[in-house]
């Protein structure tokens, strides 16, 4: 009986301890959840702070393709933007008629385009420009051709009339000349009909043409920290853009799409059409440039500024000439001193040798020193006499040679 009571007491004690522990845990959980609860205002503030801290994802829209129109200048087949912080080169592509291709050709085009997309390692943009076809140039070309045909037709008519009037040609020759005349007349009428149809077509504003371009940008900031000047950065940008554009052309050629890199004039024409869509239909870029519309106004330079520039140019030229003259004079003086020193070198050697002998006369003896000095003088005199005789011989030889040549010339004469 006692053992059973002890067992029950132990069990109750354990159950009570477990209940106390559970109650303590529940109290702690309730307290922590109450601390985490916030007011509605605190929730809004925390949500705003969290949204501010989130990094903004960079989005690309359709409108971003028109950013290349905001340019500073066009130079070296590139559009320069943002004071040299962005360079753009454009590749013009010729479209293909995908719908008229066979299934095999379509598969080849699709595989080539997939290869093109896989080879892109830099951002590009695709720009499509719709232009109204200006047929004025074509019409003028047709008119010139038709005028040439009419001139030939007039000559052939005159020749045929002369052949008929002369009655010296056979029926076969006349039929052949008449056939050529009819052919030339039909060609003239056909050319006039083409001109009429083309002029009517040019009046229709719905004749449009689409041009497709790939915009290839380059940012000098990709170079990182560098000490390049603007000219070096421009050269690097041109090299990189040209390499990228050539790579695009090569990969697009697999799809059967041909293209070319736009030159500076073609870039200007593209921008002119983009900014002046209505005016470009009737007034092209070539006419605008010839009319001088690329300048807002023209003024002559100030007279005083011109005089100042001319004075500066004269000062620079005279200073350059004077500097050259003084350098030449300085070189001449040095050359003269060198020649004088070379001429007096033997005298200086003799004088220095005498000085050394005199300084050491005590050790070598006065008599020996005197004899050595006399030998130096004798040698000096001999050198002078030899030099004089050699100079006289040279002068005599030149005189005799002159006489001989004179005699020979008289004989030959």
Image: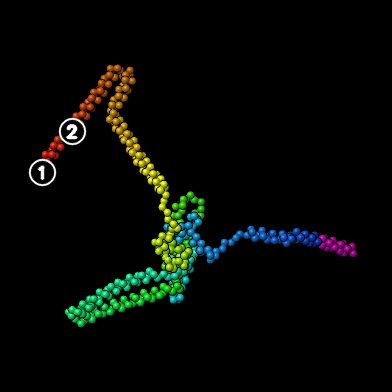
Quadrant in the picture for residue 41: bottom right
Q: In terms of secondary structure, what is the magenta stretch mainly? A: helix
- Name the side, left or right, on which 329 lies relative to 4: left
Tag 2 secondary structure: helix
Q: Is residue 223 magenta?
A: no
Q: Is residue 45 visible?
A: yes
Percent coordinates x, y for residue 377 in the rendering: 25, 23
Q: Which residue is mark 2?
A: 395
The relative height of residue 318 versus residue 52 in the rendered view (above or below) is above
| Mark carried by residue 81 | none
Percent coordinates x, y for residue 395 in the rendering: 18, 33
Magenta span of residues:
1-21
Tag 1 secondary structure: loop
Percent coordinates x, y for residue 232 in the rendering: 45, 52
Q: Is residue 17 magenta?
A: yes
Farthest residue in the right direction?
1
Mark 1 or mark 2, earlier in chain: 2
The relative height of residue 80 versus residue 341 in the rendered view (above or below) is below
- Cα separation, mark 1 vs mark 2, equals 27 Å
Mark 2 nearby-residue class (10 Å; few <14, some 14–19, many ≥20):
few
Percent coordinates x, y for residue 170 in the rendering: 19, 81
Q: Are marks 1 and 2 in contact (CB under 8 Å)?
A: no
- Name the side, left or right, on which 215 lies relative to 364: right
Q: Which residue is mark 1?
A: 413
Quadrant in the picture for residue 298: bottom left
Instruction: Give the quarter of the figure containing the N terminus.
Output: bottom right
């Amino acid at each position: 009986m006692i053992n059973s009571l002890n067992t029950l007491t132990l069990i109750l004690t354990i159950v009570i301890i477990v209940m106390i522990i559970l109650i303590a845990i529940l109290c702690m959980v309730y307290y922590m959840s109450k601390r985490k609860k916030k007011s509605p205002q605190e929730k809004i503030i925390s949500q705003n702070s969290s949204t501010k801290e989130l990094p903004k994802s960079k989005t690309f829209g359709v409108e971003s393709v028109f950013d290349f129109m905001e340019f500073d200048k066009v130079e070296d087949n590139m559009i320069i933007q943002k004071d040299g912080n962005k360079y753009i080169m454009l590749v013009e592509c010729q479209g293909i008629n995908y719908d008229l291709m066979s299934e095999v050709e379509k598969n080849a085009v699709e595989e080539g385009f997939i290869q093109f997309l896989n080879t892109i390692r830099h951002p590009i943009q695709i720009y499509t420009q719709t232009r109204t076809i200006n047929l004025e140039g074509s019409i003028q070309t047709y008119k010139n051709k038709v005028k040439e045909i009419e001139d030939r037709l007039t000559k052939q008519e005159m020749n045929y009339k002369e052949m008929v009037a002369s009655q010296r040609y056979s029926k076969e020759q006349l039929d052949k000349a008449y056939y050529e005349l009819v052919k030339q007349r039909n060609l003239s009428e056909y050319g006039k009909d083409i001109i009429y149809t083309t002029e009517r077509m040019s009046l229709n504003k719905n004749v449009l043409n689409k041009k497709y371009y790939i915009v290839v940008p380059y940012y000098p900031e990709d170079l990182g920290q560098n000490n390049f000047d603007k000219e070096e950065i421009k050269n690097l940008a041109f090299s990189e853009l040209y390499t990228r554009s050539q790579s695009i052309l090569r990969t697009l050629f697999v799809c059967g799409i041909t293209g070319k890199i736009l030159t500076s004039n073609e870039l200007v024409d593209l921008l002119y059409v983009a900014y002046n869509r209505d005016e470009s239909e009737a007034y092209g870029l070539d006419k605008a440039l010839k009319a001088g519309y690329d300048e807002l106004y023209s003024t002559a330079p100030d007279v005083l500024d011109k005089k100042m520039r001319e004075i500066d140019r004269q000062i620079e030229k005279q200073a350059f000439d004077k500097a050259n003259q003084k350098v030449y004079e300085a070189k001449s003086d040095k050359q003269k001193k060198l020649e004088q020193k070379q001429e007096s070198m033997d005298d200086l050697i003799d004088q220095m040798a005498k000085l050394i002998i005199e300084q050491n006369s005590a050790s070598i003896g006065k008599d020996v020193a005197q004899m050595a000095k006399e030998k130096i003088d004798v040698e000096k005199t001999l050198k002078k006499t030899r030099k004089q005789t050699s100079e006289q011989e040279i002068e005599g030889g030149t005189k005799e040679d002159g006489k001989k040549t004179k005699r020979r010339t008289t004989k030959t004469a």
